Amino acid sequence: MLEIQSARKVFYKGQADEKIALDGLNLSLKTGEFGVVIGSNGAGKSSMLNAISGSLVLDSGKVLINGDDVTPMPVHKRAARLARVFQDPMRGTAASMTVAENMLLADLRASKRTLRPGLNATRLASYKERLAVLGLGLENRLNTKVELLSGGQRQSLSLIMAVGGSPELLLLDEHTAALDPRTADIVMQATIRTVEALKLTTLMVTHNMQHAVDFGDRVIMLDAGKMRLEIAGEEKANVTVTDLIGHFSVKTDRMLLAS
């Protein structure tokens, strides 16, 4: 479960270029729920994810994970409870190392043990099983250097590495935005298989309106650091890309009227 309570963050406070990134944002996800966040540039999406992960310190408000207030926790302590996949496929992996070696690195980051075994048969079997969920054949390429993988394969590997420590929350930070449309759809299908297999509570930020329509239990629209729209249940099942784009148009019309 994720809960954001009255989160507020102002950049350059008191200066001419003051920017309100989060303006009393309230948002919650139930355990196992998949929320999709949309919004124009500057709506507060990245600030929200950074506040959840701990890389952005709030001026006021709280972030709770499974009922625990993690607001005072630094990034490295929150990392034990949540996983984040970024937009850049290159960011989450080591290019010169093999798929298996990257998986091992992810395991060691999550481990608290001081005596750490290497790539033994048990680990390799586990990696094959975990990668098979993706449906991309990576379970048969454990000895392949990551630099030889496609962008989609590499991003999917980043996903599996991120969730290896059984996080309580998964944050997807526009993780298909740098991919071509076909590859983005492949990564999204791999994402859904992974999320469903592990029953992960997931919050995904995206600019892809088709993905917002096709995936997730709820669509949340941010605007000026606040939640402006929430679509769930039957309404979510019937929403179209045109509907979502229409909400952006309404926002633009309000801005023009106010100017």
Image: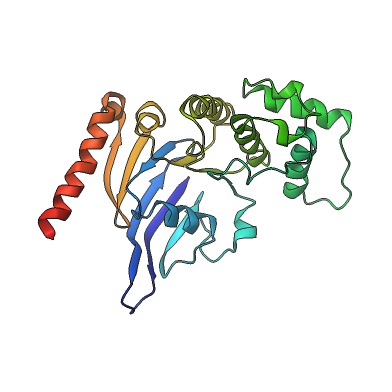
Q: Is residue 78 above or below residue 219?
A: below
Q: Name the one closer to the observer, 172 or 199.
A: 172
- 64 sits to left or right of 8: right
Q: Identify which residue is drawn at 75% across, 33% down.
A: 99
Q: Is 28 or 102 nearer to us in this picture?
A: 102
Q: How is the image coloured?
A: rainbow
- Residue 76 on image: x %, y %: 64, 59
Q: Position of residue 70 (x, y in %)?
A: 53, 59
Residue at position x 61%, y 43% in the image = 167
Residue lying furthest bottom in this view? 14
Q: List x then y, in percent, for residue 75.
A: 60, 60
Q: Is residue 204 left or right of residue 254?
A: right
Q: Nearer the viewer, residue 120 or 89?
A: 89
Split into 4 quadrants, where in the image is the C terminus?
A: bottom left
The x, y position of residue 57, in whole percent, is 49, 66
Query: How many circles with numbers are drawn on the protein?
Result: 0
Which of these two is toward me, 111 or 191? 191
Left or right relative to 247: residue 199:
right
In the image, taking residue 120 as reference, residue 55 lies left or right, namely left
Residue at 17 percent across and 54 percent down: it is 255
